[in-house]
Image: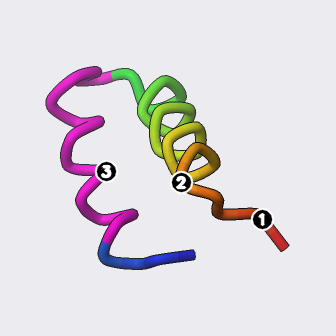
Amino acid sequence: MPKALERKLKAQARKKFPGNKKRQDKYVYGTLRKTGWKPK
């Protein structure tokens, strides 16, 4: 997983969805998938 992009997305997710960890994780995962990343 692209670590730099993941860190940036997590920071954005914390601002967009404060206090909602599950929603933050969905945001990061979904955005990474849109960029073409595939989980192993």
Residue count near mark 2 (Cα–Cα under 10 Å), binned few <14, some 14–19, many ≥20: few
Residue count near mark 3 (Cα–Cα under 10 Å), binned few <14, some 14–19, many ≥20: some
Rendered image: mark on residue 9: 3
Q: Which residues are magenta?
A: 5-19
Task: Answer left or right for 20 relative to 27.
Answer: left
CA distance for labels 2 and 1: 12 Å
- Where residue 3 sits, quadrant-wise, is bottom left
Asked if the residue at tag 3 contacts the one at tag 2, i.e. Cβ–Cβ closer than 8 Å, the answer is no
Instruction: Give whichever of discs 3 and 1 has the lower sequence position.
Output: 3
Q: Is residue 1 above or below residue 28?
A: below
Rendered image: mark on residue 39: 1
Q: Is residue 31 above or below residue 17?
A: below
Rendered image: mark on residue 2: none
Rendered image: mark on residue 35: 2
Query: Measuring 58% from the left and 37% from the top, which residue is drawn there?
Result: 30
Magenta-colored stretch includes residue 31: no
Q: Amino acid at mark 2?
A: Thr
Where's the C terminus, which quadrant? bottom right
Q: Amino acid at mark 1?
A: Pro
- Where residue 21 sits, quadrant-wise, is top left
* Colour pattern of the rendering: rainbow
Rendering coords of residue 6 (x, y %)? 39, 63
